[in-house]
Amino acid sequence: MYGNNEFRKTKNDSRFGKKNSEGEMSSYALQEAIDWTGKLMDKEFKGRGDKEYQVRYRLSENSGVPESYLYRLQYKSRTMKDVAGEYYRRLKLYYEHTCEVNEDAADRYEAERLRLRGDHEKIDAKRASARVDVAASTIRKGKKG
C-alpha cells in the first residue's frame, strides 16, 4: 500500500496531489520573496537623495521583516536554499496590501477623472447646443432678408 507507486504519473506526483517536490516549492517561494522585495524596494524609493539602506529600513519597519533578512534576499539569495515562512508571509501580506492601496488609489483617480470629464461634457453640450441655435437663427435671417 505505502510502497505502491503505480498510481504516480511522474516521479514528483504523490498520492496527496503534490506535483512538485519540497525543494522546488521552497525555490518558488524564495523567488517570490526576492521578487516582492525588489518591487517593494522600488515602491519605497523616494528619489534622488534616498539611500538604499534607508529604503531597506523603511521597508523593514512597514513589513515587519528584519533589515538583515531583506539584505540577504537582495544580495545573498544565491546562498539561500529557502525562505523563512514567517518572513515569506509578512512580505506577501505587505505586497498584497501595497497592491490593494495602489488599486484603490487608481479607482479614486479614475472616478475623479470621469466625474470631471462628465462635467466638461455637460458644459460642452450646452455650448454646442447654444451654437446650433445661434447658427440656425442666422441662417433663417439670411434667407428672409
Image (cartoon, rainbow, N blue to C red):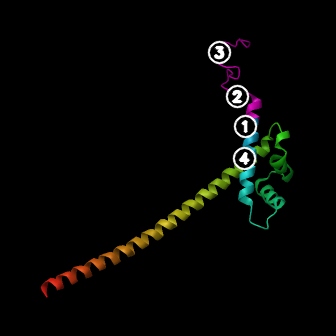
Give the mark count.
4
- Label located before the other in sequence (4 or 3): 3
Which of 17/116 is in front?
116
CA separation in Å, label 4 and label 2:
20 Å
Where in the figure is residue 112, as x and y percent of width and height? 51, 67
Q: Give the range drawn in magenta.
A: 1-26
Q: Which mark is residue 20?
A: 2
Residue ID at (76%, 44%): 88
- Label located before the other in sequence (1 or 3): 3
Residue ID at (81%, 41%): 84
The crowd level at tag 4 (other Cα within 10 Å; few <14, some 14-19, many 20+) is: some
Q: Quadrant of the rendered structure where residue 22 is?
A: top right
Residue 9 belongs to the span the image colors magenta: yes
Where in the figure is residue 36, as x and y percent of width and height? 72, 48
Mark 2: which secondary structure?
loop
Where in the figure is residue 67, as x and y percent of width and height? 84, 53
Q: Which residue bears the numbered disc 1?
A: 28
Residue ID at (38%, 74%): 124
Amino acid type indicated by mark 2: Asn
Identify the main secondary structure in magenta. loop
The crowd level at tag 2 (other Cα within 10 Å; few <14, some 14-19, many 20+) is: few
Q: Is residue 51 left or right of residue 16?
A: right
Mark 3: which secondary structure?
loop
> Are the residues flagged by discs 2 and 1 in contact, CB closer than 8 Å?
yes
Amino acid type indicated by mark 4: Asp
Residue ID at (76%, 54%): 63
CA separation in Å, label 1 and label 3:
26 Å
- Label located before the other in sequence (3 or 2): 3
Mark 1: which secondary structure?
helix
The crowd level at tag 3 (other Cα within 10 Å; few <14, some 14-19, many 20+) is: few
